Image: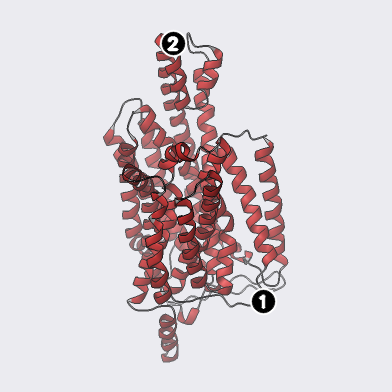
Amino acid sequence: MSGTTTAAVRQHRRAAGAGANRWIVLVVLCASLLLVALDATVLHVAVPAVTEDLRPGAVELLWIVDVYPLVCASLLILFGTLGDRVGRRRVLLLGYGLFGIASAVAAFAPTAETLILARALLGVGGAMIMPATLSILRQVFPDRRERALAIGLWSAVAAVGAAVGPLLGGFLLEHFWWGAVFLVNIPLMLVSLPVGRALLPESRGDGAGPWDVTGALMAAAGLFGVVLGVKRLGGGEAAASPFTVLPLLTGGVLLFFFVRRQRRHPHPLVDLRMFRRPAFSTSVGCIVLAMLALVGLELIAAQYLQLVLGLSPLETGLRLLPLTLAAMAAGLAGARMLRRFGPRRMVCAGFCLTAAAVLTLTAMGGADDPALLLAGFVLLGFGLETTLFGAYESMLSEAPADQAGGAAAIGETSYQLGAGIGIALLGSVMNAAYTPGLRAVPGVPRGASDAAGHSLGEAYEVAGRLGGTAGAALRRAARDSFVHGLHVTLLVSAGLLLLGALMALRLPKTTQCGEDPAGAEPALPAPREAQTAAKPRVTA
């Protein structure tokens, strides 16, 4: 490398927060992500306390739980691309401030409507924070080897936050009132704001042309409709219901016109030519498929542990803890595995390992088997995190630096959509396999059988009201039907994971782990008008 190029590299690294500072920056970014991940799950255990205090209706309670992930997923592309234009650090700091204010409002909300509004504002803040953390990470770590390690730590923190949320919520509820689950955000944000302002480097894209406000709003409204429709399906709403069809149809139409607009716009929010790069499009597809196959299983596993095995919420959290620890281990080892095996073999092996874990768990029955659950959950956590790590790293490395915010937003949106579709799909599979077993239980009236077919929890309630021999028979039939449905769902999930392994074969076999001098980046294919596509620059 020439002296001029070396000097440019050093200058680029100083501008991006080089030296020891970049690891301090990583700590700040991971702390930000931890708060957002915690807030997605910390409220789950507080729902009974919120219901008792605020007395929300059924629809209001649904919005209290769902509005945060719904708003967050809808606005990821809007704020990710805005950060590319006005500065990712600026958007991140604004997100800190809004997140802290919304947390205070939520903690002391006097009514259900106020809590819904506060949770929506938390979603806006989360949408500002999530893509900014990943895009700043892309800027601060220009060397792909170091960036892989940073992404491993970042993804491990995300896994910890999602898993620790219910445990933290349960601990706070034992000692304080339900608003404490939101108050924990405020001191951390008060620290993150000045620290982030002092340490985080500002970065943005090339800033060519105006920001496409119309396109951003179309993307936000379209994603809102699609995610809302998917959540309705996952919540048990009929597929033909207007509350499902209208959001999905409206959202799909808006996203269609958004894509059409981006292809024609001289300064698009998201350069769709990124999807013409096999590594980028395949990585996004792998993220969607991994979440689609597994998120629904997490909810079903929690029901199995509590309703079939009779474990308490705390015992359930402890049983699932090995999954989180294994995911952390995979995140920390991800950089080394990526260098040794490359993206293709790493992601493919992650999918296969996760499928093996899922098939192992099909041995679960009506009796507790701690050793089986431990082995299955460890394999599940390690395999899933290996898959997501390789996919995220490949996706982010394939995107140009000036499109980092948009690329990060696409990755996070894919994660959220995959999770929502997975809950709807696997929930439907579970219901289809569970319900038939309760239609002809001896001594149980037809109306009681129909009610018991809605869920295992409702079946137990109906059995308790019936009592006697009929109640015991219904309870036993419901438990056996649930275990059967779980086995069918696991097999479907394993099939989706093996499909993901085949998809991963399109990823690059090896990685280039050098440093991009002075912002060098993979070039995108030229527009259709050009006769020859620009080839990506690779540095040694």
Give the number of marks. Answer: 2
Q: Which residue is found at the position 67% from the left and 68% from the top?
A: 212
Q: How crowded is the residue under tag 2: few (<14 C-alpha within 10 Å), some, or many (20+)?
A: some
Estimate the x, y position of residue 7 in percent, counting from the top left: 42, 88
Kindly identify the amino acid type of the residue bearing the numbered disc 2.
Answer: Ala
Under tag 1, what secondary structure? Answer: loop
The residue that label 2 is drawn on is: 470
Q: Residue furthest bottom?
A: 3
Taking the image as shown, residue 444 lies to the left or right of residue 331, namely right
Q: Which residue is found at the position 40% from the left and 65% from the top?
A: 190
Q: Is residue 290 above or below residue 301?
A: below
- Residue 514's quadrant in the figure? bottom left
Q: Is residue 357 above or below residue 331?
A: above
Q: How crowded is the residue under tag 1: few (<14 C-alpha within 10 Å), some, or many (20+)?
A: few
Estimate the x, y position of residue 119 in percent, counting from the top left: 51, 51
Taking the image as shown, residue 376 lies to the left or right of residue 266, namely left
- Residue 11's quadrant in the figure? bottom left
Estimate the x, y position of residue 224 in percent, counting from the top left: 62, 51
Specify the quadrant that holds the N terminus.
bottom left
Instruction: Answer whether residue 528 is visible to the viewer in this image.
Output: yes
Estimate the x, y position of residue 19 in percent, counting from the top left: 34, 79
How far apart are the alpha carbons under marks 1 and 2?
A: 71 Å
The mark nearer the N terminus, 1 or 2, is 1
Q: Residue furthest left?
A: 371
The residue that label 1 is drawn on is: 209
Q: Is residue 345 above or below residue 2?
A: above
Instruction: Answer whether residue 513 is visible to the viewer in this image.
Output: no
